Image (cartoon, rainbow, N blue to C red):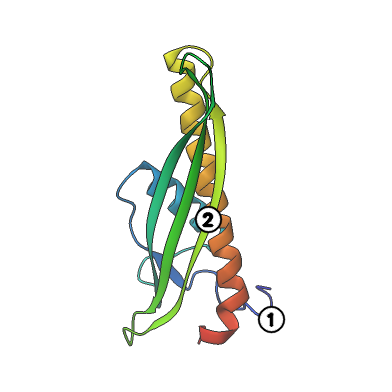
Amino acid sequence: MYGPGGSAEGLRGAIEVAAPENRDAFELVKRLDERLATQPGARYALGYKITVREEALGVTPDQVIRRVQLRGAVAYTVTDTTTGQVVDTGSVSTFTSYSTEGSTVSTSAVEDDARRRLMAGLADQIATRLVASAADWLA
């Protein structure tokens, strides 16, 4: 894909991702950097909007939540920084869950891990879509 003649030849290092403003965005940007070798000042800018929704699962008869599902989505745009033209746009979504069994500290740790997994999954989907569409907009 990234090699000579591949559909995404030239994609690595050609995108700058908007700076993260919170922990979820930090995890998303970190994973995108791993996948796409993002660069400051690159020709293309990737903007994104993250939404995460929590849903209680496994509620006991006495209303104790035993499991939480995180549903995440990212809407993204790729803009050519030289022309200001939006060259690609899309959205991705996925979910993960975690157990609330245990102490407050352990629940907090597993929630953090679930959020990292959620952002990694969303970033992987974005990277895959960019690779698939790069031949249409990458100059």
x and y percent of residue 67 in the render? 54, 26
* Residue 37 locus on image (x, y percent): 52, 62
Horizontal arrangement in the rendering, residue 92 relative to residue 131 (left or right)? left
> What SS does tag 2 mark?
strand
- Say which quarter of the image contains residue 86: bottom left
Give the quadrant of residue 76: bottom left
- Taking the image as drawn, is residue 34 in sight? no
Residue that numbered label 2 is attached to: 93
Image quarter in which the N terminus is found: bottom right
Residue 4: numbered disc? 1
Q: Nearer the viewer, residue 100 or 111?
A: 100
Residue 75, placed above or below residue 134: above
Where residue 91 appears, as percent x and y from the top left, is 48, 65
Residue at the (32%, 45%) spot, across then down: 22
- Residue 41, above or below 138: above
Query: Is residue 130 in sight in this rendering?
Result: yes
Front-lying residue, 35 or 53: 53
Q: Report crowding for label 2: few under 14, some 14 to 19, many 20 or more residues within 10 A (C-alpha).
A: some
Q: Residue at x 46, y 54 (%)?
A: 73
Sequence-wise, which precedes: disc 2 or disc 1? 1
- Between the residue at mark 2 and the residue at mark 1, the CA separation in whole angstroms equals 31 Å
Instruction: Report the amino acid beneath label 1.
Output: Pro
